[in-house]
Image (cartoon, coloured by chain):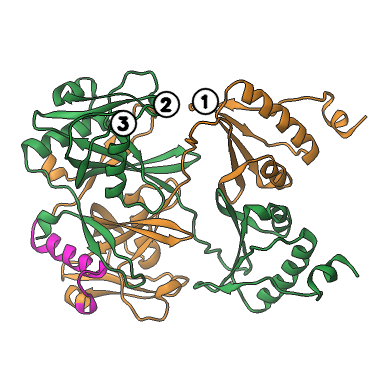
Chain colours: A orange, B green
Amino acid sequence: MDQLTIENGVENVLLPAINDDHGGVVVELKEHMGPFIFLTRLKTSMSQWTLQGKKGVWIKLPIHLVNLVETAVKEGFCYHHAEPDYLMLVNWIPETTNTIPANASHRVGVGAIVLNDKRELLVVQEKNGIMRGRGIWKIPTGIVEEGEDISAGVIREVKEETGIDVEFVEVLAFRQWHKVFFGKSDLFFVCMMRPLSFDIQIQELEIEAAQWMPLEDFAASAQKPSLMWYIYELCKAKVDKNYSGFSPQSVTSFFSDKPSYIYLNKRDLD
Amino acid sequence: MDQLTIENGVENVLLPAINDDHGGVVVELKEHMGPFIFLTRLKTSMSQWTLQGKKGVWIKLPIHLVNLVETAVKEGFCYHHAEPDYLMLVNWIPETTNTIPANASHRVGVGAIVLNDKRELLVVQEKNGIMRGRGIWKIPTGIVEEGEDISAGVIREVKEETGIDVEFVEVLAFRQWHKVFFGKSDLFFVCMMRPLSFDIQIQELEIEAAQWMPLEDFAASAQKPSLMWYIYELCKAKVDKNYSGFSPQSVTSFFSDKPSYIYLNKRDLD
């Protein structure tokens, strides 16, 4: 008996696959499998899927099946995306144009404008990264976590970095910036927040210092048209004028039970 | 002579690495290498980096070095992200909290509101995906490409799907939606566009039909508070009232020579 027979009992077994909404199949392997068995089953399955006119073939390999990655690539699969615990590979069968959806392309950052009644802005100095040791005062910023709403992410970041409790008001602006990390882009949302507490407690790991700083001092070194200059102008327009940003409204979806948020100029819409 | 000596001439060679801005190192391998050589060099390098107090160790493996993936994982590396032609692995050395930056978490979609002088909206029916065969008329939509500005992406998508030339006016709203594909999120920007041409030519691959549809007909089946309902309300607010969205302004960066765009309510800022 060869290895195949020992492990499977039959020689030709297709890989377990489910159809997707785009004429393709998704293989999600979980159980341990040797590369030789995998290769045989993959070849048989690919022949079958080709005959069936399938388009994209997806293989999701959890990291404990790293032993199968090389085999999949040698059979013509490319990487699509990866997360810490798995790798997704894909292969486009037909001769027609490849319509494999793109990988996630953006990271979502948030920055908090938190002003107290004395026209003072909550600012921090960071310990790490590109801002390190430059003595630059900036608004609290952070990265939105997987599955986290922008409005929730900015509340969390302000609390983590400064200990200040804040309430989300609206998005005043956003910036799109390319090739920020590993060729990926960044969408940075400048958010107006209302402070609910005022005693600063900094997070030692990431933050060097934090303070309430007179708004005019913050802008002293900002050159037009830098992001810092725009943040200062937005602060003034919000406090002194009647600037309207985008505020979140719950929106239902045709395809999902979960509500999500649409951010829009509510003042102008009503 | 063992394999190591044959291939390298010396027994202990560190992997080529450059320091990053966060106290870590990045190894970017390009030349072919056998797994045994790689394992030896990786072990030696890791000892060295640990002594040096390095934090995150990144290994970028182009897809032709897929033979080294299993070795890296068995030495404690996890996947970080992947693109069609490479896999990035990472290992956090110190005992302290892991501050490895998150992978890209969002895809950026765009939808175009294109209205002609007769209060007709440019709408399409899609051939593929979840909309297939439902007979639903929707605004032209698409996914922004890697490194593409939102304003450029929406112009490209309208042209591709309908043949209509459009000019970008502003972002009227955006929606954040979670777990849309492979657990990733979607940021969808509803963009006001001004038509520069009017003769529709559909793209056969993706589009079933396209037409200029009276705005009120489009809204007939839209239920509050669905996205389609909001799109209709935004159309009306833009045409009949004085709705102000976010328009792009060029912004310079402290860290980069390339200008990027900040989108804001320019009418209220001025």
In the image, are marks 1 and 3 on the same chain?
Answer: yes
Q: Is residue B42 left or right of residue A132?
A: right
Q: Mark 1 highlights which residue?
A: A23
Disc 2: host chain: B
Q: Which label lies toward us, 1 or 3?
A: 1
Q: Is residue B65 left or right of residue B168?
A: right
In the rendered image, the vertical position of residue B150 relative to residue A76, given as above or below? below
Q: Mark 3 highlights which residue?
A: A252
In the image, are marks 2 and 1 on the same chain?
Answer: no
Q: Quadrant of residue A255?
A: top left
Q: Is residue A228 left or right of residue B74?
A: left
The percent position of residue A137, horizontal first and vertical second, equals 31, 75
Frontmost residue, A216 versus B71: B71
Segment tinted magenta in the rendering: A220-242
Q: Earlier in the sequence, mark 1 or mark 3?
A: 1
Q: CA distance from mark 2 to mark 1?
A: 9 Å
Q: Which label lies toward us, 3 or 2?
A: 2
User: Looking at numbered disc 2 in the image, what kind of residue is underneath it?
Assistant: Asn
User: Looking at numbered disc 1 in the image, what kind of residue is underneath it?
Assistant: Gly
Q: Which mark is residue B128?
A: 2
Residue at 77 percent across and 41 percent down: it is A35
Residue at 63 percent across and 52 percent down: it is B63
Q: Quadrant of residue A26?
A: top right
Answer whether labels 2 and 1 touch (C-beta < 8 Å): yes
- Point out the image quarter for the N terminus of chain B: bottom right
